[in-house]
Image: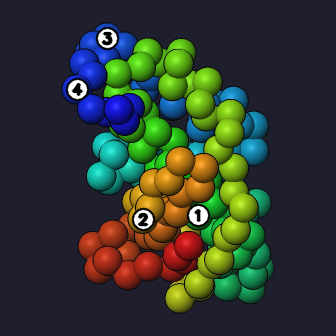
Amino acid sequence: MTATTNLPRRSADEQVRLESVLRDMFEHRICFNEVLGFHVESLDPGAAAISFAMRPDLVGHYLHGRLHGGVISTALDTAGGFVVTVAIGEKYASESAAQVAHRFGRVGTIDLRVDYHAAAMPGDLTIRGKVVRMGGQFSTAEAQVFDAQAVDRQHLFGRV
């Protein structure tokens, strides 16, 4: 029997607790995310997203005011972990928030590839991700970074 076969889904109150745990973890408990100012935008398993505001201290090219590539890479890595974590919550939808949160301790990056397509412009940035493969031990996620203009154009700045 798999984790999702014929098991009752957690209650609405328990789902709210799980979402609160996820927000707290990604916005505050992972201190580096807090330093960069990451915020959970969507906990929708099919459209999970985080965002952050570009600030002067995140600029990598001082002449052009472009976001540092390492920040883009970090945002993509974080989004990949975030979407896998959201997917774990869905995969084990019958478990309590505490039970699911215990599973998060094993999530980590083992490989990361970033393709830079254009410079991110100043302003708010959104990172959208999706799970490509959800495995028992290893999962694969894909994420894209968008600035305010790119959200409308669907033009991506970084992809993992």
State which tag comes first along the sequence, 3 or 4. 4
The Cα–Cα distance between marks 3 and 2, rounded to whole angstroms, is 29 Å
Q: Secondary structure at mark 4?
A: loop
Looking at the rendered structure, the kind of residue marked 4 is Asn
Q: Closer to the observer: label 3 or label 2?
A: 2
Q: Residue 44, how many percent across, how many down?
A: 31, 43
The Cα–Cα distance between marks 3 and 4, rounded to whole angstroms, is 20 Å
Who's the residue at 53% across and 88% down the image? Answer: 117
Q: Closer to the observer: label 2 or label 4?
A: 4
The Cα–Cα distance between marks 2 and 1, rounded to whole angstroms, is 14 Å
Q: Which residue is mark 2?
A: 132
What number is the disc on residue 76?
1
Q: Which residue is mark 3?
A: 13
What number is the disc on residue 6?
4
Residue in front for this viewpoint, 65 or 159:
159
120, above or below 106, in the image: below
Residue in front for this viewpoint, 64 or 50:
50
State which tag comes first along the sequence, 3 or 2. 3
